[in-house]
Amino acid sequence: MDVKTALLERRTIRKFTQTPILEQDLTDLIEYARLAAYPANLQPLKFAIITENELCNKVFDNTKWAGYLPDGTPKEAERPTAFIAVLGDTEIKNSFEVEAGAAVTSMMLGALEKGIGSCWIGALNKKNIMEALELDEEKYNLLYVLALGYPAQESQACPMQDNNVKYFLDENNKLNVPKRSMNEVLLFKK
Ligand SMILES: Cc1cc2nc3c(=O)[nH]c(=O)nc-3n(C[C@H](O)[C@H](O)[C@H](O)COP(=O)(O)O)c2cc1C
């Protein structure tokens, strides 16, 4: 898949089939995150792959989904089959937003190429998830989880109307994600 196609086709997926993802594919995603660009090359992020059913359920129970949709939380048979937890190592630095952006973007695009759908989740009960993961809360700062699974939903970008940023389901149950126009985002060329 070429980069342009990947950027056009990557959309957040929130409904998944229950086919498990191969462990090697999940490890590949960490490899893509490992190779991302990081300020001062500090590479302060750590990752945890979660596929065990019980642990996936614990993580899922501490996430929130699709704030703009009335019924956007995946049903039991639509849940992600894996999560990748993205953590900041406070022994390396103390702020991680830029790093998380680079890492998660790389993983989402890598997942797309493998046919795997993803949803970047920031609405988390971090404390509960850290307890479930049994990681040292002094050392690691949970930033995000990336929910993963084979897509059971279609999603596409659409032109934004009237400044309305809310994604919506169309008559075919396809998710539509409004994107601002080129005219709006490109201030000038000179
Ligand atoms: C930092 C960040 C946090 C997000 N947190 C959530 C979340 O908690 N739950 C959710 O359903 N989607 C979450 N999303 C997904 C966004 O809603 C989604 O990226 C946005 O609607 C644009 O859709 P697209 O990814 O298909 O372009 C998050 C995205 C980002 C970048």
Image: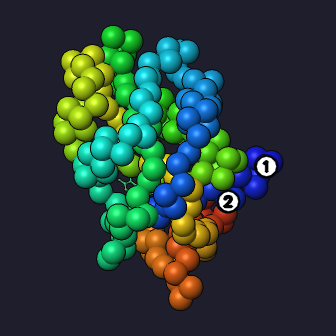
The type of residue carrying mark 1 is: Met
Going from N to C along the chain, the mark reached first, 1 or 2, is: 1
- Where residue 156 appears, x then y in whole percent? 61, 69
Q: Quadrant of ligand 1?
A: bottom left
Q: Is residue 95 above or below residue 167?
A: above
For this view, does 75 lie left or right of residue 106? left
Res 1 label: 1
- Where residue 56 appears, x then y in whole percent? 35, 45
Residue 64 picture quarter: bottom left
Q: Answer yes or no: is residue 89 visible.
A: yes
Residue at figure coordinates x 20%, y 32% from the top left: 131
Q: Is residue 121 above or below residue 143?
A: below
Residue at figure coordinates x 61%, y 32% from the top left: 24
Name of the residue lying farthest toward the top = 91
- Where residue 157 appears, x then y in whole percent? 61, 68
Asked whether disc 1 touches disc 2, contact meaning CB atoms under 8 Å apart, the reply is: yes
Q: Label 1's element?
A: loop
Give the alpha-carbon distance from disc 1 to disc 2, as whole Å: 10 Å
For this view, does 86 lie left or right of residue 127? right
Q: Answer yes or no: is residue 97 visible.
A: no
Q: Is mark 1 within 8 Å of ligand 1?
A: no
Name the residue carrying label 2. Answer: 9
- Where residue 12 appears, x then y in whole percent? 52, 58
